[in-house]
Image (cartoon, rainbow, N blue to C red):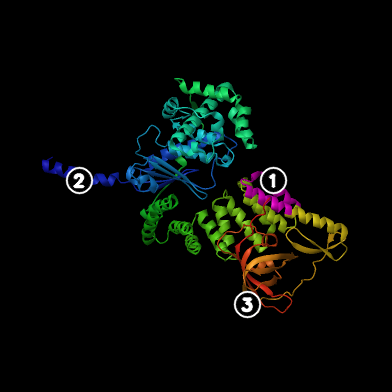
C-alpha cells in the first residue's frame, strides 16, 4: 500500500470518528422508570437496572410502604458536563456554586432525575439516591421527625450496586471526620429540629444536623440488626400517634443521656458495618425494557419539559418554539406550554395549550387532567369533554387520585351518576388516604345524598388528618353544621305534624308526615325559563335556602351603594356556575357553601313580582372563610 493510500485511509477514519461517536437519542422504559439519553442503549439499561434495584430494595425493606409515587419518574442521563449544565437549575450555574453530579425534582405531577454520566466521584449519584429516599417516605413526611427523615436519606444515599448484591449503609467518611471535630447537638434538641430551626438552615449548624442525623440513624439501624431489636420501628409508631418526639425517643430508645454517650463512642470507633442485600432473586429483567429511537424534535420536547419544571422558563420557551415549528403534531410541547402558562397565571392560555395537546392525541394523563381542570375553572363546567378527558386521565394513570376526585365532583355538580360519584371519591381516598380535601368532598357528596350520619363520620375520621389550625377549624365548623341540622330534624320529627317541613343536611327543605318524608312541597316561585330582561348584581350571598328537588334562593347583599337582589332558581343543578381567581372545592355544596360567599350574579326578570328574578349565572369570587374555634 502506498503512503498516499495510507494517508487517505487515515483521513477517512478521522472524518468518520465524530459521526460514530454521535449517538441517536433514545427513550428506554422499565416497569417503573423512563430514561431519555443520547449516551447509548447499554448505558441506559445499566442506569435503569440500578434504579429498579433501588426500588426493589425499598420494597423489600419496607413491604408496607407505597414505593411508587403517583406521577412518573423521568430520568435524563446527560453524557457530559456541557449537556448537564444545559438542563440543571440556573442557580447552580453561577460562579462558586456547588458542582452537581445529579439532581432530583419532585412535583405533584411528575418526578425528574437529572444525571451527569461523566461525574468523577465514589458515589456520583448520592444526591439522587438521597432525594429518592425522601420520595419513599413522602407519606410519612408530615409526621416523621426531620432528623430521622434526613438520617434515612443520608443512610441510603451511598447505596452501591454490585453484580448480584446491593451494599447499603456505607459509612460517610466526611460525616465521621466532621463530627469528630465538632460538638454534637444534644439529642433532645436534635429530636425537636423542624423546618424553621436554625440547625436545619444555617450552614455550620446544618452540617452538624445532617452528619449527626446520619450517625444516629446508622447506629440505631446497625444495632437493631445485630441485636434483633426494633427501636426505629417503635419510635416511628409512637410519633405516628402524635406523641412528642422526645417522649417517643425516650420510650423507644431508653435514657437519652446514655444514648448520647453511646453515640459519641460510636463516632470515635475505627470500624463501621454496612448491610449487604442479595439482589440475585430480584424480579428485574433488563431484557424486558422497551427501547425507542427519538427524533430530534421529540428529544428536544422532553428536554424543554424538564427545563419548564426546573424553573428555566425562558430556555424552555425558546426550545419549544423550535420544536413546534419542526413538528407541529407533537403533543408534549403543547402540554409544556400549558404548564408554563399556568405558572404565569394565564388560565385561558393554559386551557388552550392543554386542549391542543389533547386534540393531538396526547398519551399524557397530565394533559387530559389539566385540560379538564382548566376547562371547568374557566367557566365551561358543563363541557362533555371534561368527562372524556378525566376518564382518559384515569385510564392512562390509574394511580392518580385527583382524577377520580375531580370526576366525582363533576358528576355531583351535574347531579348525575351519583352512585358512581361515590365510588370514584372512595377510590381517590383509597389511593391517597392523607388527602384532607378528598374527605371533605366525600362528606359534601354524602350531604347531597341526604346521608348526614355518614357525612359526619367522614369528617370525624378526617380530623386526624388536619395539618394546621385552619384545617381543624374548618372540619369542626362543618361537623357543627351537620350536628345542628340533625338536632333540628330530630326536633321536627318529634314535634311537627303532617305537611310541615324539615331541612335536610344539604339545606334542602322537604315535607314530612308523622316523621317520614312525603311528596315534595310545591315550588315557592314559578318554574319557568330565565328569558326575561337580564340584570347583574355583585355582593355577598345571604340567607341561602334550598328545597327538594333542586330549588334554591338567596339574597345578594350588594356592597356600598349597589342595589341588592333576591333571586331564585327552580333547578340549582342547571345554573351556569363559574369561579374567578380561585379554585372552589371539587364537590362544593351550594346549599352549605354559598352562605357568605362573594359573587357576581346575573338574573332575569320573571313573572313573579314578589322576587327580583331567576338566576342565570353565578360567578363566585371567593367562598366564606372557615369558621374559627
- Disc 2: which residue: 12
Residue 414 seen: yes
Compared with 556, 61 (above or below) is: above
Q: Reply yes or no: does residue 39 show up in magenta.
A: no
Work out whether mark 1 precedes mark 2 in sequence or the reverse, and give the earlier one: 2
**Residue 376, percent across and down?**
57, 62
Q: Which mark is residue 461?
A: 1
- Disc 3: which residue: 534
Q: Which mark is residue 618?
A: none
Q: Which residues are magenta?
A: 453-480
Q: Are marks 1 and 2 in contact (CB under 8 Å)?
A: no
Query: Which element is circle 3 on?
Result: strand
Q: Are marks 3 and 1 in contact (CB under 8 Å)?
A: no
Work out whether mark 3 precedes mark 1 in sequence or the reverse, and give the earlier one: 1
Which one is in front in this view, the residue at disc 3 or the one at disc 1?
3
| 140 left or right, relative to 490 | left
**Residue density around tag 3, few if under 14, some if 14–19, many if 20 or more, within 10 Å:** some
Task: Out of 435 and 463, give the one closest to the viewer.
Answer: 463
Query: Which element is circle 1 on?
Result: helix
Q: CA distance from mark 3 to mark 1?
A: 45 Å
**Residue 405, percent across and down?**
62, 54
Compared with 73, 187 (above or below) is: above
Q: Are marks 2 and 3 in contact (CB under 8 Å)?
A: no
**Residue density around tag 2, few if under 14, some if 14–19, many if 20 or more, within 10 Å:** few
Q: CA distance from mark 1 to mark 2?
A: 75 Å
Amino acid at each position: 500500500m502506498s503512503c498516499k493510500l495510507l494517508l487517505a485511509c487515515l483521513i477517512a477514519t478521522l472524518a468518520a470518528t465524530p459521526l460514530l461517536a454521535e449517538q441517536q437519542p433514545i427513550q428506554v422504559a422499565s416497569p417503573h422508570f423512563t430514561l431519555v439519553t443520547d449516551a447509548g442503549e447499554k448505558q441506559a439499561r445499566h442506569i435503569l437496572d440500578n434504579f429498579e434495584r433501588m426500588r426493589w430494595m425499598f420494597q423489600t425493606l419496607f413491604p408496607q410502604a407505597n414505593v411508587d409515587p403517583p406521577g412518573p419518574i423521568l430520568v435524563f442521563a446527560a453524557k457530559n458536563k456541557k449537556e448537564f449544565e444545559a438542563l440543571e437549575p440556573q442557580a447552580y450555574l453561577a460562579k462558586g456554586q456547588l458542582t452537581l453530579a445529579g439532581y432530583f425534582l419532585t412535583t405533584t405531577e411528575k418526578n425528574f432525575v437529572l444525571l451527569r454520566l461523566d461525574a468523577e466521584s465514589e458515589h456520583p449519584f448520592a444526591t439522587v439516591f438521597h432525594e429518592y429516599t425522601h420520595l419513599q417516605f413522602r407519606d410519612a413526611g408530615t409526621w416523621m421527625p426531620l432528623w430521622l427523615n434526613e438520617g434515612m436519606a443520608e443512610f441510603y444515599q451511598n447505596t452501591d450496586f454490585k453484580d448480584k448484591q446491593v451494599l447499603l449503609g456505607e459509612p460517610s467518611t466526611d460525616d465521621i471526620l466532621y463530627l469528630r471535630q465538632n460538638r454534637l447537638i444534644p439529642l433532645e434538641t436534635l429530636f425537636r429540629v423542624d423546618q424553621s430551626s436554625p440547625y436545619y438552615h444555617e450552614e455550620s449548624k446544618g452540617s452538624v444536623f445532617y452528619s449527626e442525623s446520619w450517625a444516629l440513624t446508622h447506629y440505631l439501624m446497625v444495632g437493631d440488626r445485630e441485636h434483633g431489636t426494633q427501636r426505629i420501628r417503635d419510635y416511628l409508631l409512637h410519633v405516628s400517634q402524635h406523641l412528642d418526639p422526645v417522649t417517643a425517643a425516650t420510650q423507644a430508645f431508653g435514657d437519652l443521656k446514655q444514648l448520647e454517650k453511646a453515640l459519641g463512642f460510636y463516632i470515635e470507633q475505627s470500624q463501621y458495618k454496612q448491610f449487604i442485600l442479595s439482589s440475585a432473586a430480584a424480579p428485574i429483567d433488563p431484557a424486558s425494557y422497551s427501547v425507542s429511537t427519538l427524533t430530534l424534535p421529540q428529544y428536544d420536547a422532553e428536554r424543554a419539559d424538564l427545563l419548564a419544571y426546573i424553573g428555566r422558563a425562558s430556555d424552555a420557551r425558546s426550545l419549544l418554539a423550535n420544536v413546534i415549528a419542526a413538528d407541529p403534531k407533537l403533543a408534549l410541547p403543547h402540554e409544556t406550554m400549558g404548564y408554563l402558562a399556568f405558572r404565569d397565571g394565564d388560565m385561558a392560555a393554559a386551557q388552550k395549550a392543554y386542549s391542543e395537546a389533547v386534540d393531538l392525541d396526547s398519551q399524557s394523563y397530565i394533559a387530559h387532567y389539566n385540560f379538564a381542570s382548566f376547562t371547568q375553572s374557566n367557566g365551561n363546567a358543563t363541557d362533555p369533554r371534561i368527562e372524556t378527558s378525566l376518564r382518559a386521565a384515569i385510564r392512562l394513570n390509574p394511580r392518580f387520585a385527583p382524577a377520580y376526585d375531580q370526576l366525582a365532583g363533576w358528576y355531583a355538580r351535574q347531579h348525575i351518576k351519583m352512585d358512581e360519584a361515590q365510588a370514584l371519591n372512595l377510590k381517590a381516598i383509597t389511593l391517597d388516604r392523607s388527602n384532607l380535601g378528598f374527605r371533605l368532598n366525600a362528606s359534601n357528596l354524602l350531604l347531597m345524598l341526604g346521608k348526614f350520619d355518614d357525612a359526619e363520620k367522614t369528617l370525624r375520621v378526617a380530623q386526624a388528618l388536619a395539618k394546621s389550625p385552619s384545617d381543624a377549624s374548618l372540619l369542626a365548623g362543618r361537623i357543627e353544621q351537620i350536628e345542628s341540622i340533625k338536632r333540628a330534624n330530630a326536633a321536627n320529627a318529634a314535634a311537627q305534624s303532617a305537611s310541615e317541613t324539615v331541612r335536610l343536611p344539604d339545606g334542602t327543605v322537604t315535607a314530612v308526615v308523622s316523621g317520614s318524608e312525603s311528596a315534595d312541597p310545591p315550588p315557592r316561585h314559578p318554574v319557568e325559563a330565565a328569558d326575561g330582561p337580564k340584570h347583574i348584581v355583585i355582593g355577598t350571598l345571604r340567607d341561602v335556602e334550598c328545597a327538594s328537588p333542586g330549588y334554591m334562593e338567596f339574597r345578594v347583599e350588594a356592597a356600598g351603594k349597589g342595589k341588592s337582589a333576591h333571586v331564585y332558581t327552580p333547578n340549582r343543578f342547571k345554573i351556569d356556575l363559574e369561579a374567578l381567581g380561585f379554585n372552589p372545592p371539587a364537590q362544593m355544596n351550594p346549599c352549605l357553601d354559598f352562605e357568605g360567599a362573594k359573587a357576581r350574579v346575573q338574573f332575569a326578570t320573571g313573572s313573579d313580582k314578589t322576587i327580583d328574578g331567576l338566576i342565570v349565572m353565578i360567578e363566585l369570587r371567593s367562598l366564606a372563610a372557615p369558621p374559627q374555634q
